Amino acid sequence: VLTAPQVGEVVTAGAAFAVSPGLVPEVAGACGEHGLPLLPGVATAGEIAQALARGLSWLKVFPAAQLTPDWVRAQRGPFPAVPLVATGGVDAYNAQDFLAAGCRAVGVGAALEDPQQLELLAELMRG
């Protein structure tokens, strides 16, 4: 979701939550008005602080592959309790690194198109 009007569209479509690549104040406000949980993307400590100030709890590390697990570890210092979800370039080869760095979850996309990664991802999920 990129704009406030799109929030209304996804609510009408029956969405249980919204995801945005970044923290857009108008989107966060519209989600709040509709009671729709929002998972916004963050890439700086300032964006994390702004999201928390708006009452958002779960945040999306985006683009995770460029930010790296070390970025996640660095953010855990000032924000130890914030649930982070790594997305954007996460695959079977780096998902565990993001989880070990402190992310509570990962989201994969393009990796699902790679048959070799599907079994590796399944193994990761099995623990």
Image (tube, rainbow, N blue to C red):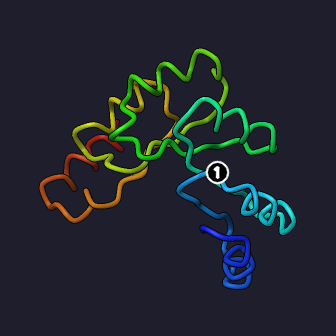
The number of numbered badges drawn on the structure is: 1
Seen as rendered, the residue at the extreme left is 116
Q: Residue at x 83, y 60 (%)?
A: 32
Considering depth in this image, is 125 or 111 the residue closer to the camera? 111
Q: How far across and down, in percent of the image, does residue 124 sit? A: 30, 40
62 versus 20 height, above or below: above
Q: Who's the residue at 33% across and 46% down the image? A: 90
At x 22%, y 39%, the residue is 93
Looking at the rendering, in which quadrant would you find the N terminus? bottom right
Residue positioned 49% across, 26% down in the render: 102
Disc 1 designates what residue?
A: 23
What is the x, y in percent for residue 95? 33, 39
Relative to 118, does residue 14 appear above or below in the rendering?
Answer: below
Query: Residue pushed farthest right?
Result: 33
The secondary element bearing badge 1 is classed as loop
Quadrant assignment, res 80: top right
Side of 102 relative to 124 (left or right) = right
Other-residue count near label 1 (Cα within 10 Å), few / some / many at <14 / 14–19 / ≥20: many
Specify whether 35 is left or right of 77: right
Q: Quadrant of the C terminus?
A: top left
Among the 4 quarters of the image, the one containing residue 33: bottom right
* Figure quadrant of residue 28: bottom right
| x, y percent for residue 85 | 51, 42
Q: Position of residue 101 (x, y in %)?
A: 43, 24
Question: Left or right of 92: which side holds 78?
Answer: right
The amino acid sitting under disc 1 is Leu
Front residue of this view, candidates 46 and 121: 46
